[in-house]
Amino acid sequence: MVIERVLIVDPIDGEYCGSVVIENGVIVDIIKNNSAPRYIVMPGFVDSHSHGKAGIDCMTASSLEFENWAEHVRTEGVTYLFPTTVSSSKKSLENVVANFSKANHPVLNFLHFEGPFINIERSGAQNKKYITSFSKDRLPEVKDKVKIITAAPEVEKFNELIKFAKKENIVISLGHSNGTFKDFKESFEKGINRVPHFPNALKRFHHRDVGPIGAVFLYKFYVELIVDNMHLSNEFLKLVYNILGPKRIMLVTDSIPAAGLEDGIYNLGEMNVKVKNGVARLENGSLAGSTLKYIEGVKNFRKATNCSLKELSMVTSYNSLKLLGIKGGRIRRGYPAKIVILDEDLNVKKTIV
Amino acid sequence: MVIERVLIVDPIDGEYCGSVVIENGVIVDIIKNNSAPRYIVMPGFVDSHSHGKAGIDCMTASSLEFENWAEHVRTEGVTYLFPTTVSSSKKSLENVVANFSKANHPVLNFLHFEGPFINIERSGAQNKKYITSFSKDRLPEVKDKVKIITAAPEVEKFNELIKFAKKENIVISLGHSNGTFKDFKESFEKGINRVPHFPNALKRFHHRDVGPIGAVFLYKFYVELIVDNMHLSNEFLKLVYNILGPKRIMLVTDSIPAAGLEDGIYNLGEMNVKVKNGVARLENGSLAGSTLKYIEGVKNFRKATNCSLKELSMVTSYNSLKLLGIKGGRIRRGYPAKIVILDEDLNVKKTIV
């Protein structure tokens, strides 16, 4: 298969015209040329934080539903989806791992466990009754199926979680936390450098106590951003882009099962979420994930920052995979042919997986 | 006069060894050489925000006291002092201008009016009863003696203040304000790019409303910083240094008359200030200026940021003068011989004015 006459966008090699040759799911050749490109070819998007879509809920999805979900987000350019749990019982998480393990779709690779080892005071849309200090016994067998655990550095036995994560080849993401600047700094020094839906569910910034937000800016953590024009202001986005740069940003949707459905009342981890004009909130008014389509986040980010396509390929794909140690996120010989083809307005024309 | 065998520090030419030749208050020559330097020579410091020192109060100082004050801060390396008023009556400001005009000391050039055109909700240590919307009639004749007016962009008739300031060759500093991101952005677009004692007496930063702090970071305002290890945390300092860079920072003391005296109760613009362990607060606990010595702020800044001496000469001298349109802040032929000589630990050995 040859994708002819396109603008190739690679996070390292940059932007140039050419054709991409694919065989058996691998990019086997790239032929540079000077023809006017018809489309843009970028590495397929990575959504490393998503709780559900179109009525499908990560917590209850059957293997078929996981596959349908994957197929659904593929239409938005996503080629790596990390279905994300909420704080729940061991039994419930066990079911998720079991059903996910049976699913078979090239967009599905790993799960993301958000909680239950988080701070009850920063629970957001997480069910408080399942939030707990770390214990291996609170988790099911992860069976190489879990790649990210979002946890608060101040939870009891966090150091044991670090050991566990290292052993299981899992990346810890520091969030839903009341942790201090020092907590985040010390975690960073232990190699933990990722923060979910920055800076939601974290302590606020102050000039006499810059807190975790200050730590993220000073030490240049990798941050997930929900770019739905609701969780963050455009000015904040620009600041993050200026301060951390495009190499430290990872777009996610944090979408909930109501994403893609009409406004109404929905369920999220045994809690009620009200969706109005596409904005999901708990009864107390807290934002509860998003109903964002990945590709809309991509467009919003580009509009807010005026970034280059090369930078866009970093924040939508390369950075996430690099952090997780997964080979991908590039349009280059030898890399997996997980590719999104877009028009000049960034509408998805085709996704190859 | 020749200052021989010194490390010359210039904000543009950088750091190099040589001797400085001075005649009639002007640097007439610089002779580069490779001898081991005995001392560091930097442009004399600029304190563009200081209410008093050693019992001398800008609001009540006689011309002799202004001269004593100038002589006092000269021992800390200051060669440009901008005595700073607080919000007060027209009559009172008139007296300040009159007494200041009679003072004669090379360290004294201009006054800084902090208020009275500020926001009563962000008054800090300013006396609320004198805070008012802009009217030319609330000011005395400024007679080329006032160079800075700190004002809030949201005060009534702010645009008339802008016109007035332009006519009188005065720089507006945006502070003691409840202004929004938009207020600061729009002021910036009108050419106002300075903020006093950043980010004290401003709205807080939030990721859905980044406010004036966000505007300062995005548009790169010039900021006054009080580096007394009290107004700002070291981490905040590092962030400002990273985000704005050394070309946008201006160290000030914001010192009050109690600076250089023992702990106790002092007066500031008709209000009581309690100084304990060198920290000045109003009865409600708000910080009320500082008791900082300029040279201590210089040492604190260097320690927190690990900046170069070249950068230090920017934040202590060059930036302030550049912003105010005053020729100075350089160790270079043709520039005024306002110079501080320091040892390697940044202790002031001599100040030439």
Image (cartoon, coloured by chain):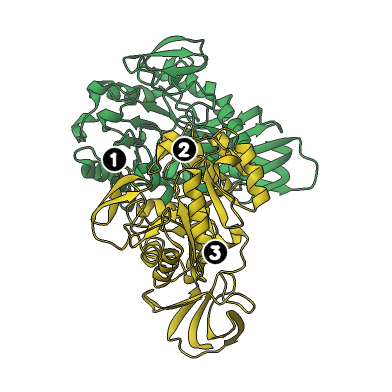
Chain colours: A green, B yellow
With B183 as the anchor, is A122 left or right in this view? left
With A335 as the anchor, is B51 left or right in this view? left
**Amino acid type at image mark 3:** Asn
Q: Is disc 2 placed on a helix, strand or loop? A: loop
Circles 1 and 2 in contact, beta carbons < 8 Å: no
Mark nearest the camera among 1 and 2 is 2
Q: Position of residue A201 (x, y in %)?
A: 36, 32
Q: Position of residue B139 (x, y in %)?
A: 55, 45
Q: Is residue A221 above or below residue B209?
A: below
Circles 2 and 3 in contact, beta carbons < 8 Å: no
Q: Is disc 1 placed on a helix, strand or loop? A: loop
Tell me the crowding category of disc 1: few under 14, some 14 to 19, or many 20 or more residues within 10 angstroms, Cα based: many
Residue B131's mark? 2
Tell me how far mark 1 sits from mark 3, CA to CA: 48 Å
For the residue pair B244 and B126, the one nearer the viewer reads as B126
Tell me the crowding category of disc 3: few under 14, some 14 to 19, or many 20 or more residues within 10 angstroms, Cα based: some
Residue A244 visible in the snapshot: no
